[in-house]
Amino acid sequence: MTSESPTPEATPPARRRSSAIWAAALVAAVIVGLLAGFWVRGVLGSDSSAPALDVVDVGFAQDMATHHNQAVEMSATALEQAEDPAVRTLAFDVLTTQQSQLGMMRGWLMLWDRPLSSEQPMLWMRRGDSHTAGTDHQMPAQESMRMPGMATTEELAQLRRARGAAFDTLYLQLLLRHHEGGVSMARAARDNATVPAVAALAKQIDDAQTAESQAIRAMLAQRGAPTLPMN
């Protein structure tokens, strides 16, 4: 009797090991972000000096945390489904960086005793609309509540269904639009935040996502794929 050759089932354990490593890195990023958020208590001031709910600092932390959360969700999917190793590497970088920043912003909000999300998203950007390109002082309320670059429920479902090269392309397209929307938010906070630590984080987000956007554009160009219009 001849011995059976190894089956293709040998690859899942390696994928599971990689998933375990990614999960451990994600947990570490969450912890680092939360600790960093609490560490800057002295920079942000005591609870008695917490910013009002409608100021740029609080609104940015609430909305950018929500914005980051979607990028983390898309990138976690990419770690499991992307075909191109370069796309998986990008997804890992986005996931760990943005999860850490998300933890930091939520740490601030807890220190300020403020809600983790806003009932009126993007209202804070109207306070700094002179620094935000294309923002009209008289824009309708529903327009001011639209978070730029966010994927729709249908687009997220389409991403989860996609496989192979089609997944890679759609992830890159959605992430690029998401980054470009995040950059507009970060620049508004960079220019208008009153808390130095918030302005510094906003600049860090702007710098990182601008650089990543350039890389994503190049990856899409290699695939001959178009970019998505801003929503």
Image (cartoon, rainbow, N blue to C red):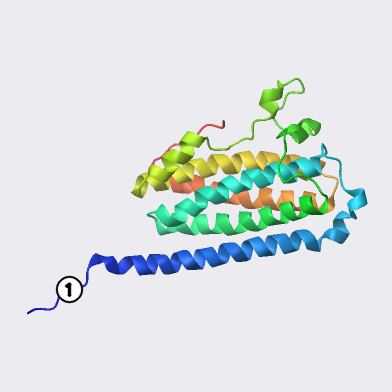
Tell me: 209 left or right of 9: right
Closer to the camera in the image, 111 or 137: 111
Q: Quadrant of the C terminus?
A: top right
Residue 182: image location, x then y, percent: 64, 42
Which of the 4 quarters of the picture holds residue 179? top right
Instruction: Give the class, few, some or many, for how many residues have Cα within 10 Å of label 1's Cα (few <14, many ≥20).
Output: few
User: The N terminus lies in which quarter of the figure?
Assistant: bottom left
Where is residue 162? Give x, y as percent.
38, 44
Residue, x 72% and y 44% (percent of image)? 62
Q: Nearer the viewer, residue 200 or 24?
A: 24
Q: Position of residue 36 (x, y in %)?
A: 74, 62
Q: Where on the picture, by quarter, is residue 9?
A: bottom left
Which is nearer the eye, 206 or 100? 100
> Which residue occupies 56% across, 51% down?
72
89 relative position to 162: left or right:
right
Examine the rendered structure and indicate whether residue 57 appears above or below residue 228: below
Q: Which residue is mark 1?
A: 5
In the rendered structure, which amino acid carries the disc numbered 1? Ser
* Total numbered labels: 1
Q: Residue furthest right?
A: 48
Q: Which residue is most to the left?
A: 1
SS label for mark 1? loop
User: Does the image show residue 191?
Assistant: no
Q: Is residue 76 left or right of residue 31?
A: left
Residue at point 42% right, 45% down? 160
Q: Is residue 62 visible?
A: yes
Spot occupied by residue 135 in the image (x, y as percentages of width and height): 71, 27
